[in-house]
Image: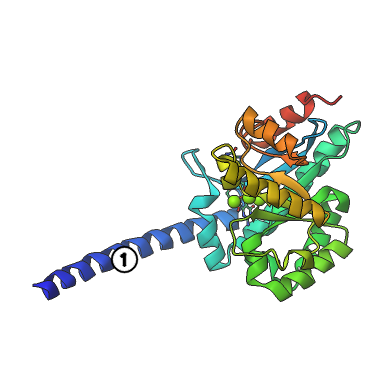
Amino acid sequence: RAVARGGACTEVFEANLRERAVALLDMETKLRQAVLKGREFEVHYQPIIALDTGHLSGFEALVRMRRADGTLVLPNEFIRITEETGLIVHIGRWVLREACRQMRAWQMKFPEYPPLQMSVNLAGRQFVQPNLMQQIEQVLDETGLNTDSLKLEVTETVIMEHVEEAAAVLVKLRDKGIKLLMDDFGTGYSSLSYLHRFPVNTLKIDASFIRRMDESRREANIVQTIVTLAHTLNMDIIAEGVETAAHLSHLRELDVEYAQGFYFSPPVDKIAAEALISDWPRW
Ligand code: C2E
Ligand code: MG
Ligand code: MG
Ligand code: MG
């Protein structure tokens, strides 16, 4: 009987797998077509705030997919499969170009504004491309965006999965004057002993730590420790997932440099982002 039940289980399991495979294939086909047409993707922008002045320091570019019915698909539904299939390389290059072009346009439109920064996420696949530097240089060239205005975000996990290559790529990017952020810091496996080897300018503390910060002294101490570590290594901090006034005042007390989160604004489309720029208090 056990065997029979096991057999039934296997059948259900296989049916689920088949269903999942079909769904994935379907998603992949849609993504491929979207990449080819280049129209179904959109970049949204979330403001990053300098905590000492409250000024807008820049934006993080976050990709979305627009379904034919107009609804928006968030990256957690499609990024992983684009990484597995390699499509992320094409999407990522498009996002980089679009975000740089947009930032250049805003800088021209608001010439009296202190120069804003654009932060772009790089997937592992993109990060290890041999021609990454040429791609970035080409995009900066084409769009006219100043090197100083571009920041690249690479997750802690991607860096730790390719320690040797990552160190080399990061040095090249640094020499080119491009600022590097380590994203989702604290969610990867222990990187503390490696951290000083990577020329990153900024650590982005993952939202999960910020969320738990108010829960206990212990959680607050973890954030404090990350901040101290970063400052010792001459890195700045961006706190991700800042949702409440309490988070904000806590982070200010810890001398955290930058914050990003729903408390200030969710990621918004380019039109709403432009309105944020023109309305943001500047003095
Ligand atoms: P990430 O780079 O860590 O981006 C931050 C995520 O946190 C974004 O999710 C943002 O919408 C969300 N977020 C911002 N503020 C808050 C808040 O106060 N509370 C909460 N709960 N969440 C907040 P999103 O846009 O869904 O992106 C998810 C992830 O997808 C990103 O995490 C990044 O890893 C990846 N991703 C997004 N765009 C790109 C891209 O263009 N290229 C690559 N390679 N990955 C991307
Ligand atoms: Mg990011
Ligand atoms: Mg992050
Ligand atoms: Mg994340």
Q: In the figure, residue 259 lies in which quadrant?
A: top right
The location of residue 128, given as percent across then percent down, is: 69, 71
Q: In the figure, residue 197 lies in which quadrant?
A: bottom right
Q: Which quarter of the figure is the C terminus placed in?
A: top right
Residue where numbered disc 1 is placed: 18
Q: Is residue 159 left or right of residue 4?
A: right
Q: Residue at x 81, y 55 (%)?
A: 232
Q: Residue at x 18, y 71 (%)?
A: 6
The location of residue 2, given as percent across then percent down, is: 12, 72
Q: Residue at x 68, y 33 (%)?
A: 248
In this picture, is 103 found above or below 264? below
In this picture, is 246 found above or below 115? above
Q: Which quarter of the figure is the N terminus placed in?
A: bottom left
The location of residue 140, given as percent across then percent down, is: 83, 55
Q: Total number of numbered labels?
A: 1
Q: Residue furthest left?
A: 1
